[in-house]
Image: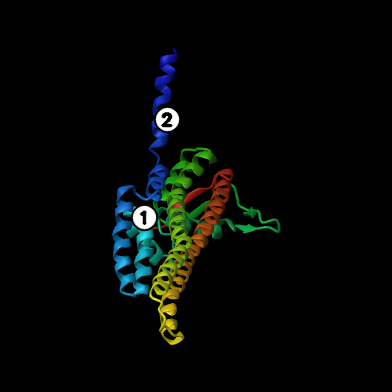
Amino acid sequence: MKSEEKKDEKPKFFSTIKKSTLVVNQAAAGAGVAGLLGFGGFFVVASVFFVTENYFISMLTISFGLLVYVAGLDLAKILLSSFTIFFSSKHLITKAAHLQDTLEALKEALRLRRDARGEIKGGPVESSSSLRLPNNPLVHEIKKVLEDRKDFEYAEYISHSYYVECHELYDYSITSLDFVAHSMPLFGLIGTIVGLIAMFDGLGADVTVETLSPQLALALKTTLYGAIFSSVYKVISSRFEQRIRALDYDYETFSRALEVVVENKCSIEVEE
């Protein structure tokens, strides 16, 4: 009997560790060897630019190296997402965009609003009323749930699958960009210290303020560029933070709208 119970437990355990969230966590850890090698390559190139006193290019290269370290082979995905999020009001994952479009139609059909306490209210909605919604996969799945008379928990499970993938992308991007933003000032400070050490090593009896000032200014540039790039990555990260809050709001509102639809046994008509 115990052996049969163990057999039943094995598939559950392995199905859990194969979830896509584990894949995202592995990528966030730096994608192993690819992240380390990528960072090493960028660091060598940045060192060459630093020696030749191209401090801006050096710090830019270091920032990409840090992003490669934390994101690994997902670097292109983060860069594309960061660029797209400034020019599109839609969520970056297609499923989340379907949830967003469907929610807009449900808001109008159910007259959803927030009361004084911030709770989402809908209605009044007539029982067995018909709702006209956009033609997308989410609407088709919800329509089938209503036709099969499934409960709200089943419908919410389906809608959650249209939410979680985009949430993971936003959260992953925030973590990666914040890592670079927090690291860049430290690399800027390291560059300044190295520059100051080299400057003091070259001091002699004939050194004047006029000859010393330009060298000091060059050394301090790495701190300046480190702060600038840190601010840029933090600004991009904040954009993802705004979008993840919007996604959470959309999912919360959609879940409430779905509950109203199921409770009132509404039917769905798909737009042509």
| Quadrant in which residue 84 is drawn | bottom left
Q: Amino acid at mark 2?
A: Phe
Q: Residue furthest front?
A: 205
Query: Marks 1/2: CA distance?
Result: 30 Å
Q: Which mark is residue 187?
A: none
Q: Secondary structure at mark 1?
A: helix
Closest to the camera, between mark 1 and mark 2, is 1
Q: Residues within 10 Å of mark 2 (few under 14, many from 20)?
A: few
Compared across the picture, whether 175 is left or right of 75 comes to right
Q: Which mark is residue 69?
A: 1
Give coordinates of residue 37: x percent, y percent: 29, 53
Frontmost residue, 96 versus 12: 12
Give coordinates of residue 111: x percent, y percent: 59, 58
Q: Which residue is mark 2?
A: 13
Q: Secondary structure at mark 2?
A: helix
In the rendered image, the vertical position of residue 182 relative to residue 51, given as above or below: above
Q: Residue furthest top?
A: 1
Q: Quadrant of the N terminus?
A: top left
Looking at the image, do the residues carrying marks 1 and 2 touch, with CB atoms under 8 Å apart?
A: no
Name the residue located 54 percent from the left edge and 58 percent from the top edge: 245
Q: Amino acid at mark 1?
A: Tyr
Give coordinates of residue 49: x percent, y percent: 31, 71
Number of labels in the image equals: 2
Mark 1 or 2, nearer chain start = 2
Frontmost residue, 77 versus 222: 222
Compared across the picture, whether 246 is left or right of 117 comes to left
Q: Residues within 10 Å of mark 1 (few under 14, many from 20)?
A: many
Q: Residue furthest bottom?
A: 210
Name the residue located 44 percent from the left edge and 18 percent from the top edge: 5
Name the residue located 34 percent from the left edge and 49 percent from the top edge: 31
Name the residue located 55 percent from the left edge and 56 percent from the top edge: 249
